[in-house]
Image (tube, rainbow, N blue to C red):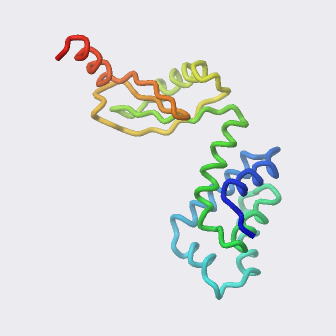
Amino acid sequence: MNLKPKTLTQAFFYANESDIASAYAALEIFSSLLDQFDEVREFFLHPRITLEQKEAWIKAAMKELKAPAGVDSFLMLLIKNGKLLELKAITEALHRIKNEALGIAAVQVESAEPVTELERGHLKTMLKEVWQAKDVEFSEVLNPELLGGAVFHMDGQVLNVSLRHKLSKVKQVLHI
C-alpha cells in the first residue's frame, strides 16, 4: 500500500475532526519525541522490536496524553507502512488544516526586538481584523536588520511595516 503523507494527513483530520485540537496535540508531542530523542526513534525503527511492543508503548503514551481514540491506530498505521519518519511533515500539514478549519491565522512575526505581551495583544486584535480570523497564533523570528517595526507573514502574504522597509521607500523617493 503506497500511502502518501497528504492523503494520510487528510484522513487523520477527517477521522478526528470533532476533536482535532487534542488529536493534533498528541501527534505533535509524539513527533517531538521522535525528533528529540534518538532512543525513542531507534525503538520504533528497530526491526527486532515487535509491533506488539511498539503498539503497547504507543497505547500507554496516548492514554497518558489523554489522546482521542484513533490516534494510536494512526501511529501504528504509519509504523506498519514504513511512514513513521514522515510524521513531522504530516503534523506540519495537519497544523495548517486544523488552523484553517478552526479559523486560526498562523502568523510569523519577524521583528528586531522580541514582541511584548502588550504588543502581542494589540497585534492579535489588528491581525484578526486584517486576516478575518477567529484567532491568531504567533511564531516569532528576531531579525535585528529590520531596525524596528515588523514584517508579518501568513499564507504567502507579507505585511511589511519595518523601519528598514520604510527607509528603503524614502531612499527610492529621494533617488539615493
Which quarter shows the N terminus? Answer: bottom right
Left or right: residue 93 versus residue 7 is: left
**Residue at image point 54% right, 76% down:** 39
- Please identify the quarter of the rendering in which residue 56 is found: bottom right
Q: Residue at x 48, y 36 (%)?
A: 108
Q: Residue furthest top?
A: 174
x 68%, y 43%: residue:
97
Depicted 2 relative to depicted 66: above or below:
below
Query: Relative to 96, is 60 above or below?
Result: below
Residue 81 % position (x, y) = 71, 72
Towards the viewer: 56 or 20: 20
Compare residues 175 and 120 and report the one nearer the observer.
Answer: 175
Tell me the quarter of the image containing the C terminus: top left
Relative to 98, residue 56 above or below:
below
Residue occupying the point 71% across, 64% down = 3
* Residue 93, placed above or below residue 59: above
